[in-house]
Image (spheres, rainbow, N blue to C red):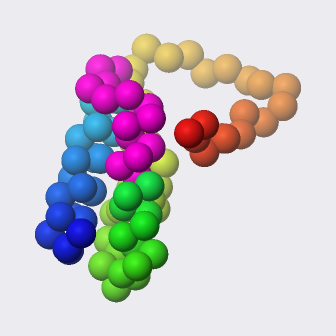
Amino acid sequence: MNKKEYLGRIREIEEHNRRYYEESRPRITDEEYDRLLAEVREVETAHPEWVSPDSPTRRIGGRPSGGFKTAAHRAAMLSIDNTY
């Protein structure tokens, strides 16, 4: 993958983040999303000089959609990264 394709993949993931987190209307499965993100991670490992500060590998998700209530949990709700 060249740098232009890498930057395009980042934009693609950001669009999926927006649709998933802000609109609650994903277009791809979680597995497909995880594959895209893994591809970006591989490129960033091979080309650390390309890593963008706003890369989706540098942050989690996006703005949550409205309508959710805050809930307290007895134990921390920790991420399992992905299941694939």
Question: As displayed, is residue 42 above or below residue 83?
Answer: below
Tell me which residue sits at (71%, 39%) in the image: 78
Q: Relative to 70, is 39 above or below?
A: below
Residue furthest to the bottom in view is: 49
Q: Is residue 12 above or below residue 23?
A: below
Where residue 51 appears, as percent x and y from the top left, is 35, 74
Residue drawn 32% across the image and 71% down it: 52
Say whether residue 75 is left or right of residue 10: right
Query: Would you say residue 24 is visible in this rendering?
Result: yes
The residues colored magenta run 21-37
Residue sticking out furthest to the left: 4
Which residue is painted at 26% across and 26% down in the image? 27
Please say whether residue 3 is one of the residues in the magenta stretch.
no
Horizontal and vertical percent for residue 55?
A: 35, 62
Q: Is residue 53 visible?
A: no
Q: Quadrant of residue 66?
A: top left
Q: Is residue 36 magenta?
A: yes
Q: Is 34 placed left or right of 25 in the picture?
A: right
Horizontal arrangement in the rendering, residue 25 relative to residue 80 (left or right): left
In terms of image quadrants, where is residue 17? top left
Q: Look at the picture and state if 79 lies above or below 2.
A: above
Residue drawn at (72%, 34%), measured in percent from left and top?
A: 77
Question: Residue 50, how many percent across, how many down?
Answer: 30, 79
Count up the numbered dots: 0
Quadrant location, the N terminus: bottom left
> In the rendered image, which quarter is residue 81 located in?
top right
In the displayed structure, does residue 13 sit left or right of residue 37? left
The quadrant of the picture occupied by the C terminus is top right
Q: Position of residue 46 (x, y in %)?
A: 40, 79
